[in-house]
Image: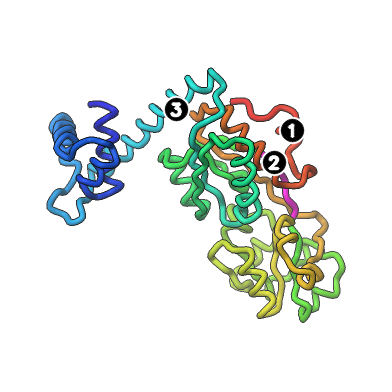
Amino acid sequence: MTLQQMEYIVAVDKYRHFVKAAESCNVTQSTLSSLIQKLEAELDLTIFDRNSHPIKPTLMGEKVILQAQVLLFHASQLKEMVLSEKQQEEGSLRMGIASTIAPYILPKLFKGLSEKHPSIQLKVEEARVSTIIQKLERAELDVALLATPLHHKDLLEIPLYQEKFVAYISPSDILHLTPEVNTEQLPTERLWVLQEAYCPNNGIFSFCNRIKGNASIYEAGSIETLVRIVDENGGYTIIPALHIPLLNDKQKERVHPISNPTPAREVSVVIRKDFVRERLLNLLAQGISEVIPEEMVNERFKKFGIKL
């Protein structure tokens, strides 16, 4: 059993085609097939159903492939650990990011990294939080940028910044007449929310326990769409402070501060506990911190950076 065989079965699972998998691994199809067959003989099981079109893994094969992905991840971590000892500032990072964070970070982050650290290859996947966590667990992602805490025993959360929320209120709504909105008095019957963003694990808002069908819930992840829904349908929603610069002048007049208390979200870099590429992680986190207002950046991160 070799890492090369692990690489081959992961490639076949990805492409669902032996020839394409072999091409991606820079070997002949016969070499790839032969080594996979030897692995199947060693494990005494069939990993792939070759009668299926396209090829797909068997039930046991899926479990073997998942373990292979983890093994390859640890092997790459070992190589990266050697690189980190030499403090090399290059390599690739696969990052997952929540849809409610991505618009405020990614455009300037890509630009900043390309200018200051062109040797870093950042590959980003925007997805639901649950999907990102699963991919971190399976080592399909290296790092994530998510609102925390997640309360996940196998993941390490490193707080990067704290962001306040504000109310975005339609001019037709009576709440628009209130200069500053009280958190405890937010009505739910005219509220539009993102379920995953605002109310995971009962959320940071008191209205999470009061919604129960009174609010209109938008299940996807676009704050921009929420704003447009309020513009067209009335009522109000809650938006992160970093979204305010994306509003036009007319829309900015519909923004109201929230108090008693002021709700905020902690946004963290999230990694597996066995992640070792400290230098690359610091460069990524520093790039993110330069995108947001300095007063939002976590004080501990400012002083000490990330120590693994």
In the rendering, at what x and y percent does residue 188 appear? 69, 71
In the rendering, at what x and y percent does residue 84 appear? 53, 22
Q: Secondary structure at mark 3?
A: helix
Which residue is under mark 3?
77
Residue at (52% x, 42% y) in the render: 122
Does the CB distance between marks 1 and 2 fall below 8 Å? yes
Label 2 – label 3 distance at C-alpha: 25 Å
Which one is in front, 171 or 123?
123
Query: Relative to 264, does residue 74 appear above or below in the rendering?
Result: above
Which residue is under mark 1?
302
Residue at (28% x, 49% y) in the render: 15
Q: Secondary structure at mark 1?
A: helix
In the rendering, at what x and y percent does residue 215 appear? 63, 72
Which residue is under mark 2?
289
Relative side of 63 to 223, left or right: left
Relative side of 89 to 56, left or right: right
Which one is in front, 159 or 210?
159
Does the CB distance between marks 3 and 1 fall below 8 Å? no
Query: Relative to 118, does residue 240 appear above or below in the rendering?
Result: below
Give, as a single range, the part of the protein colored magenta. 160-164
Residue 37 lies within the magenta run: no
Label 1 – label 2 distance at C-alpha: 9 Å
Q: Amino acid at mark 1?
A: Lys
Quadrant position of residue 259 = bottom right
